[in-house]
Each structure stands twice: as C-alpha cells, then as structure tokens.
Amino acid sequence: MNQPAQPPVDPRDAIELLEEILQSNAMLHAAIVGLTAIREKIPDYSETLRAMQGHLDAMEARLGRIEAKPALQLTPAIMADEFGKRALEVRAEDRKALGEARDALACSLGRAEAMIRQRRSTAEQDWWVTWAAMGGLLCGAFLALVGVVAAT
C-alpha cells in the first residue's frame, strides 16, 4: 500500500494554525466566563414564581367552584323556559295584589261615602230639628197670643 506523498508542511502554517486555535479557545473561554457572570447576576425569582403559582391554583379552584354551579349548566332554552314560568308566577302574584288593593280601595271609598251620607243625614236632621223648634216656638207664641186675646 502506497500512501500518496504529502506535501511538506511548513512550520509557520502549523504555528499560525495553533495561534488561531488558541485565540478561538481564549474567545470561547471569555464567552463562558461572561455567561457565567451574567447568570450569577440574574435574580432568583423562585419565591415570586411560587407565590404566582399559589395565586393561580387559588384562581383555578374558584373557577372550578363557579363551573360547578347549577346555573352554568343551564342552556339558553332552559333559562328562557324558567324565566317564562317565573314571569307567569309573578304576574299571578301581581294580579292578586292588585285585586286586594282594589278591594281595599272600594272598602275605603264605601266607608268615606257612608261618612258623607251620615254627615248629610245629621245635617238634615239638624235642619229638621231647627225648623220643628221654630215651628213649635211660633205655635206656642200663637197659642199664647190666642190665650191672651181670649182671656180679655
């Protein structure tokens, strides 16, 4: 086996190549040292992240409780049907309350009319008593006059 003949290596090329490798190695070393220094300057956020995780867990638990509520299980059709039923119940209650109010008003008006009639009848009665007293007085005076004239 014959190996092809290699051209002779110039020692200057080897030295330049070694210097390039050393320079590249120095640059890599400086980069690693710089990255390590930067990493050491980065603040530790682990406590803040743990607190945030706690808040997120609490929020997730609250959302779970909210999602478990029966109102969120209702569809719009079911809700519309429930609203319709409740509206009918409320209207029936309103009708009943209006009827009771109407009856109470009629009763109050009847009492007021009775008071007015009673006042009128009292006034009429006073009028009749006054006229009867005047008539009695006039009749008495007339009879007294007739008695005086007849006695003379």
Image (cartoon, helix red, strand yellow):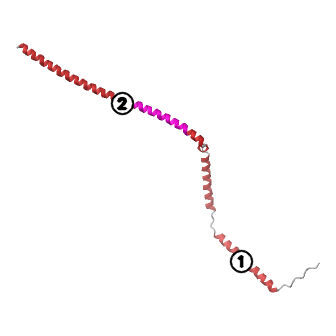
Going by the picture, which residue comes out furthest to the left?
Answer: 152
Question: Which part of the image, by quadrant, shows the C terminus?
Answer: top left
On residue 151, the disc is: none
Residue 2 against residue 130 in the figure, above or below:
below
Q: In this view, does 8 lie to the left or right of 23?
A: right
Say what secondary structure mark 2 lies in: helix
Q: Residues within 10 Å of mark 2 (few under 14, many from 20)?
A: few
- The amino acid type, in three-letter code, at marker 1 is Met
Q: In this view, does 13 lie to the left or right of 105?
A: right
Residue 8's quadrant in the figure?
A: bottom right
Q: What range of the chain is rendered magenta?
A: 83-104
Q: Would residue 63 be counted in the magenta stretch?
A: no
Q: Residue at x 49, y 35 (%)?
A: 91
- Measuring from the top left, give residue 104's x and y in whole percent: 40, 31
Gap between marks 2 and 1 measured at Cα? 107 Å
Residue 42's quadrant in the figure?
A: bottom right
On residue 109, the disc is: 2
Which mark sits nearer the N-terminus, 2 or 1?
Answer: 1
Q: Is residue 2 left or right of residue 97?
A: right
Question: Which part of the image, by quadrant, shows the N terminus?
Answer: bottom right
- Measuring from the top left, give residue 146's x and y in whole percent: 10, 15
Q: Residue at x 58, y 41 (%)?
A: 79
Closest to the observer: 26 or 9?
Answer: 9
Q: How crowded is mark 1: few (under 14 residues within 10 Å), some or many (20 or more)?
A: few
Residue 8 against residue 101 in the figure, above or below:
below
Mark 1 = which residue?
27
Q: Residue at x 41, y 32 (%)?
A: 102
For the stretch drawn in magenta, the main secondary structure is helix
Q: Residue at x 76, y 82 (%)?
A: 19
- The amino acid type, in three-letter code, at marker 2 is Leu
